[in-house]
Image (cartoon, rainbow, N blue to C red):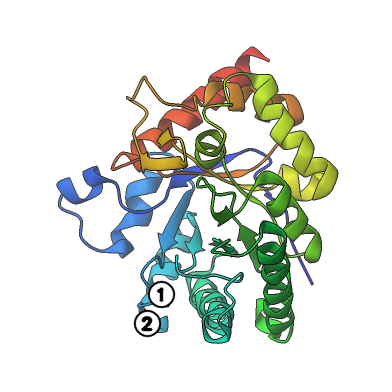
Amino acid sequence: MTIRENTADRPLFGPSGHSASFSAEGHTATTEMPAWLRARELDLFEYSFGRGVNISSKTATEIGKVCAEYGIEMSVHAPYFINFASPEQEKADNSVRYVLSSLKILKCFGGRRCIFHAGAQGGAAREEAFARTKDKFAETLAAIAAEPEYADLIVCPETMGKQPQIGTVEEIAELCTMGDNVFPCVDFGHINSLYGGILRTRDDFARIIDTFAEKAGEFKTKNMHVHFSKIQYGAKGEIRHLTFEDTLYGPEFEPFAETIVKYGLTPHILSESAGTQAEDAAQMRDIWRAVAERA
């Protein structure tokens, strides 16, 4: 298995999905996205299969060629209805297939990272649900290993923002120990929402990084996948994604930028803001640059 780190030796930034401004400027096709992002000095684009993998290999290959031309790296988000914790055999088996079908298109895109939600607790005890998650994920990793063309691809379980979902920092860190090709997707907005606004200072972010470094390893943590957005939350966690203009809910990016510089991290950072993904990704890049210059 060949897993390469971020060769740019710096954080990479981009949007998850199409910003409202992309459409407002008259763009309609994803093949137009790479040039649009490069003009904004962005590096990444995440394509969501939230409602299912409904793009052809031919179209994905065309998009991938344009991404290569403009130096944009793509990642994919596997369907939201993956649930490795499901006690229903058909749903659990389908979850394995959803990951594999996502990887097939990811390969056509020329990308390397597939992000997924691991599952939900349902009516089971947390320990039971997480045990089922690990068993089914192990089956998924075995299926991936059986496909030589996927040897350089990375799967990224995501930290989640609602209490019934599998995806605490500790759970994701443990899943990352199950294979060399498993890196964390750390969604700081989700973490902040799940625990009622705990991410305020550099030390708050550093504690998250320290946990992943200790349990998942320094290499995976240095090259982790990151989702970052401000998110409204309530008693049960995440409610809805916001934009960087919001002043009530966090988290703020600058303390995390300070942590990136302090630890020498080179993550892939995707903005999931509500309609301003590209603009907020560029803002994160600028904040990181300013912090790095001060260091």
List the residue tagged with mark 2.
56
**Left or right side of 23 for 6:** right
Above or below, comparing residue 132 to residue 20 in the picture = below
Q: Nearer the viewer, residue 109 or 47?
A: 47
> Residue 264, located in which quarter of the rendered image?
top right
> Looking at the rendering, in which quadrant would you find the C terminus?
top right
Amino acid beneath label 2 = Ser
Instruction: Work out whether 76 lies above or below 237.
Output: below
**185 lies left or right of 109:** right
- Which residue shows up at 80% across the image and 42% down it? 213
Marks 1 and 2 close (CB-CB < 8 Å): yes
Residue 52 at x, y percent in the picture: 39, 74
What type is the residue that disc 1 sits on? Ala
Q: In the picture, which quadrant includes the N terminus?
A: bottom right
- Between the residue at mark 1 and the residue at mark 2, the CA separation in whole angstroms equals 6 Å
Task: Check residue 60 in the rendering and tell me which mark sits there, or answer none.
Answer: 1
Observer-nearest of 99 and 160? 160
Residue 105: percent from left, percent from top: 48, 76
Q: Residue at x 29, y 59 (%)?
A: 32
